[in-house]
Image: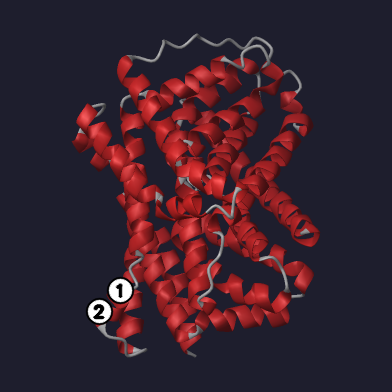
Amino acid sequence: MLSAIIILAIAVAIILGYKTGINTGLFCMVFAYIIGCFVLGLKPKEVIAFWPTNTMFVILSVSLFYNFAAINGTLEKMSSSLLYSCRRFPGLLPYALFAVAVILSIMGATYFTVLAFLAPITMMICEESKMDKLTGAAAINCGALAGGNFPTSNLGVVFRGLAETAYEKENGAAIDTFGMEMQIFLFAVVFSLILISGYRFFVKANRNIGKGVTFKKPEPFNAVQKTTLTLMLSMMAIVLIFPLLQILMPANASIKYISGKVDVGLVAIIFAVIALLMKIAPQKEAIAKIPWNTIIMIAGAGMLIAVAVKAGTIELLSAWIGSNVPKPFIPIAFSFVGAFMSFFSSTTGVVAPALFPLIPGLSAATGLSGAVLFACTVLGAQSSAISPFSSGGSLILGSLGNEEERNTLFSRLLLVGVPVSVLVCAAYNFVVAMML
């Protein structure tokens, strides 16, 4: 009965957030307090302690640093330069757009930032090159999500923290979250290329793609943008080099020690302070652009999920899926459930915090790879992110100036983009899970 109440509370929080436009995390906090204190008998301080401090700090610090690049035009200049470099291969435009989105996202730009910068450019390129707009939308959407899954990128950092917490709460065991997230990143890239190729070669409108397209040569990076780019590359190098060296030389004690001390959130704070001292963008604007809405959503959902874990709901759900869903169909189940939940809510704020805690126990019970199940959940949730009701889909639609074009693309995103992406992803997840 208690577990049913908690599951209902999660569903109601998602529905209320969707219907009212109020941050879902706030509703989750309310339910966490009511259920935690008045049903489970927890102390208020215990409920407050469920606030995911580590994850919140990383999101805040990483987004703060990369906001400098967004404000002073470095990210936009990078997009234009990378696109211009692909001007001699117009037939490969969908893949070029995908690559640009992946690179920007890996370098730390958030999903929304990547789409905000690339959506207007992409729709313009689609118009000039006679490329199907849904194809262009899918390319940048997949790229932004795939790149975000990189271990040190914004989404990757969140998923690593959630996975680590899930394993610690299940049996106190540790997990190689860097390696796990690298797998998710690679799976996401392959899935994206399959999906984009399907649009590229099977959509009739793309037969004349690339004919007549022109690219304007972007202006050179100015001094401030060059400095920003140097800081971005330096931060990436510091965060990446020691975990990679540890993989290559696992027996080296010095590398292992330093790798254990390198934290992406703390490193980002250092570089944010350096950026402020160098005055590459106004502090007020950089702080204002921190995704507080996302932070509240993830924190609130995390608190409610923690209450569910305390009540044994997660274990109950894990046991039910493990005993009622045939082993070969578990990856498909996670894929579809993730896609359905993500259609109405945030992948990082709701879907991953709700489903990740199920995975350690289910992996142990069925023998399926935990990393693969994490990947199925993430990719499934992200497969419906192109929905016109999502932030990504709305950004793409908002980049079109013509009302008639917006209405047409709205219907195609909803009736073609989402179903195709979800079904292809489910099939892909099934194949990957059976092979590994």
Looking at the image, residue 62 sits to the left or right of residue 326; the answer is left
Looking at the image, residue 408 sits to the left or right of residue 350; the answer is right
Q: Which residue is rendered at x = 74% and y = 34% of the image?
A: 197
Q: Is residue 21 visible?
A: no
* Observer-nearest of 417 and 358: 358
Image quadrant in which the C terminus is located:
bottom right
Q: Indicate whether 425 appears above or below 398.
A: below
Residue 223 found in image quarter: top left
Residue 334 found in image quarter: bottom right
Q: Indicate whether 91 appears above or below 362.
A: above
Total number of numbered discs in the rendering: 2
Q: Is residue 221 visible?
A: yes
Q: Indicate whether 23 appears above or below 396.
A: below
Q: Which residue is rendered at x = 41% and y = 10% of the image?
A: 219
Residue labelled with disc 2 = 45
Q: Which residue is rendered at x = 60% and y = 32% of the image?
A: 98
Looking at the image, residue 195 sits to the left or right of residue 389; the answer is right
Q: Indicate whether 164 appears above or below 320.
A: above
Residue labelled with disc 1 = 49
User: How far across and how far down the image is residue 419, in percent?
Assistant: 67, 50
Q: The disc labelled 2 sits on which kind of residue?
A: Lys
User: How far across and how far down the image is residue 89, in percent?
Assistant: 68, 16
Looking at the image, residue 418 sits to the left or right of residue 154; the answer is right
User: How far across and how far down the image is residue 270, in percent?
Assistant: 29, 42
Q: The disc labelled 1 sits on which kind of residue?
A: Ala
- Coloring scheme of the render? secondary structure
Q: Residues within 10 Å of mark 2 (few under 14, many from 20)?
A: few
Do the numbered discs 2 and 1 sit on residues whose CB atoms are within 8 Å?
yes
Is label 2 in a helix, a strand or a loop?
helix
What is the CA distance from the residue labelled 2 to the residue labelled 1? 6 Å
* Observer-nearest of 118 and 226: 226
